[in-house]
Image (spheres, rainbow, N blue to C red):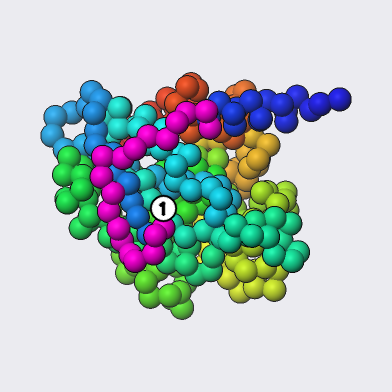
Amino acid sequence: MTDPAVERDAAEAASAFAHPPVAPDATGSYGDHPDQVIDFYAPHGEPEAAGPAPLVVVLHGGAWRAPYDRQHITPLADFLARRGFAVANVEYRRGSSLPVQGSGGAVAGRWPETFDDVAAAMDALPELVPAHLPQADTRRTVVTGHSAGGHLALWAAARHVLPPESPAAWRLSSPPLLRGVVALAPIADFVASEELGVCGGASAQLLGGSELWAERLPFADPAALLPTGIATTVVHGRDDIVVPASVAESYVAAAAKAGETVGLTLLDGVGHFPLIDPAADACAVVAEEISQLAW
């Protein structure tokens, strides 16, 4: 007998991945590696206000694993551009596509390269945007990301509260100039995620395995990097079986314990993938949450 939840998740994934990739209007590099690039999408919808458009920085998911690149989230980037946003779709280095002993599949992430790249990309945007996306207003920047990309979006907004011994290129001396973060089904609490076996233990793989888990957790886990002082909203499907909604609830609870309020929008009858599927109603909810922070 098939599991209805698994069948629904497969159907939602098929719908989200059925859209063809959308080519960007421009691409810029923030480093020498082929993955150190950002695709830019100019606003071509009906803007909510005259003048430059808010900038939405998109960080794709895929459990930080190499086979999953930014192409699968380009329909969301185009969807947001049609809503009048300027969009920057960030690529970054991910794990090896080849399994290693004991990994249970493709390795999640690279340490420290995945974090190096997100920090470098965010820092490069003020120079890259005027050249490649002059329609964008970097003073109104919102960061969003899905799944593993949701984790990276939360991390990017927390660089000023990283431990002092963090790599210098990661840590900021003051809060980033962001209007806010909209994290979509994020892997937002590593301890909760590992307890649930999210994405085959991807969080532990990202940190280099169980032997390095405790040492590296304070530098990478959004639930340990609170409060940030950055407006943050989490959007999560109640029926998500890839990253269960309890992971988001755990992160929101950690924020409250740290004295910070994080918005949590739980969508009934929604799983993991409709949040990035332009054909799904959930995607419109995502755009509205971004609008509330950006405009």
Q: Residue furthest left?
A: 51
Left or right: 258 as drawn, with respect to 181: right
In front here: 191 or 78? 78
Residue 6 in view = yes
In front here: 124 or 232? 124
Q: What residue lies at 53% left-to-right and 48% top-to-bottom? A: 68
What residue span does the magenta drawing correspond to?
A: 17-35
**Measured along the vertical axis of the image, is residue 208 above or below residue 70?**
below
Disc 1, SS: loop
Residue at numbered disc 1: 91
| Location of residue 18 in the rendering, given as x and y in whole percent from the top left corner | 52, 28
The amino acid type, in three-letter code, at marker 1 is Glu
**Measured along the vertical axis of the image, is residue 147 above or below residue 175?**
above
Left or right: 55 as drawn, with respect to 235: left
| Location of residue 237 in the rendering, given as x and y in whole percent from the top left corner | 58, 32
Which of the 4 quarters of the picture holds residue 53? top left
Quarter of the figure with the C terminus? top left
